Image: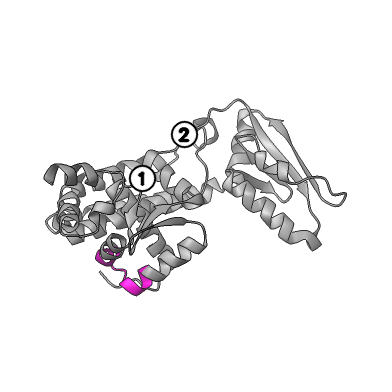
């Protein structure tokens, strides 16, 4: 596998993948560095990445002697929790929550902050000044009236066809469907390589990471939506089925590989949560 030190977003994804593979709540830095190297990310790049993610609030760190133990945090934790535990699909009651805003160009930093908060809350933009979502927009409460900007919230009742059209625009569903179909095609090609990789622990770990990256990339670009708002041929279930097939076929080799790497690590005892601590206790 080629070195990927120049791919910061992919390396960031690798951190989340390893937390998922170990099902861990906390992982010591030396273990992350060692396993990131197995994914193709060199130690200096991983250490720089961990420092950057700490600054950005995507990780927290606790010192155990001379070793740093990391936990996922903030939006990054929320994103990986969705991938690990699945999305909670909201029900459709026939109405969107809406946010209407009119913020002058000279206050564009304020406007960008509002749009960022809306995105994190799962809202999409139908057109400039109109955001829709499926949950109460509590993020609006911090934008108080200032006599210059307009930020109001409410609800919008729609018939099913109109609601689907607005959802398609707000969350770019045609583009996301195209991404998902490309992911399906890539996963089908990846499955052709699974049997060969399943006999090599490092190759199996890398291939599982690749499968998760392919399937995950389009998935968290929009919130979970009720079936009533999705096209009839929505391709997400096919992507998840292919991903689960790949993971199921790779898991024995990956599990054996991770077991032996952790058993040989002097820092594995600092892992919190997941499958390793009970195994280590029994083995000890």
> Does residue 86 show up magenta in the picture?
no
Q: Which residue in the structure is indicated by mark 1?
A: 239
Residue at far right of view: 147
* Residue 268 in view here: yes
Q: Quadrant of the N terminus?
A: bottom left
Q: Which residues are magenta?
A: 36-46
On screen, residue 254 versus residue 240, left or right, reads left
Residue at image location 70% in from the left, 43% down from the top: 140
Which is nearer the eye, 202 or 53? Answer: 53
Which is nearer the eye, 85 or 101? Answer: 85
Residue at far front of view: 65
What is the x, y in percent for residue 142?
72, 45
What is the x, y in percent for residue 97?
66, 35
What is the x, y in percent for residue 152?
77, 40
Dot 1 and dot 2 residues touching (CB under 8 Å): no
Q: Which residue in the structure is indicated by mark 2?
A: 88
In the depicted structure, whether residue 222 falls above or below residue 53: above
Residue at image location 29% in from the left, 63% down from the top: 30
SS at circle 1: helix
């Amino acid at each position: 596998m080629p070195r990927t030190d120049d791919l910061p977003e992919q390396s960031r994804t690798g951190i989340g993948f390893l937390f998922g593979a170990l099902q861990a709540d906390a992982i010591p830095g030396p273990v992350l560095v060692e396993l990131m190297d197995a994914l193709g990310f060199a130690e200096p790049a991983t250490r720089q990445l961990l420092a950057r993610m700490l600054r950005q609030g995507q990780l927290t760190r606790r010192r155990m002697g001379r070793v740093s133990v990391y936990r996922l945090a903030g939006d990054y934790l929320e994103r990986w929790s969705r991938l690990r535990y699945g999305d909670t699909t909201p029900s459709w009651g026939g109405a969107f929550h809406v946010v209407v805003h009119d913020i002058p160009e000279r206050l564009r930093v304020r406007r960008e902050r509002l749009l960022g908060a809306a995105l994190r809350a799962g809202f999409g933009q139908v057109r400039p000044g109109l955001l829709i979502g499926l949950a109460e927009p509590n993020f609006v409460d911090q934008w108080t009236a200032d006599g210059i900007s307009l930020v109001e919230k409410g609800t919008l009742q729609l018939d099913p066809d109109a609601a689907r059209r607005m959802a398609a625009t707000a969350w770019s569903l045609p583009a996301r469907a195209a991404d998902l179909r490309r992911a399906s095609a890539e996963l089908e090609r990846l499955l052709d390589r699974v049997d060969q990789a399943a006999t090599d622990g490092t190759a199996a770990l890398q291939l599982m990471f690749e499968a998760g990256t392919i399937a995950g990339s389009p998935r968290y670009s929009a919130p979970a939506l009720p079936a009533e708002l999705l096209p009839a041929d929505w391709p997400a279930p096919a992507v998840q089925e292919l991903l689960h097939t790949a993971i199921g076929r790779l898991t024995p080799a990956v599990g054996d590989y991770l077991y032996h790497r952790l058993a040989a690590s002097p820092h594995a005892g600092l892992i919190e949560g997941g499958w390793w601590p009970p195994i280590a206790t029994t083995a000890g």
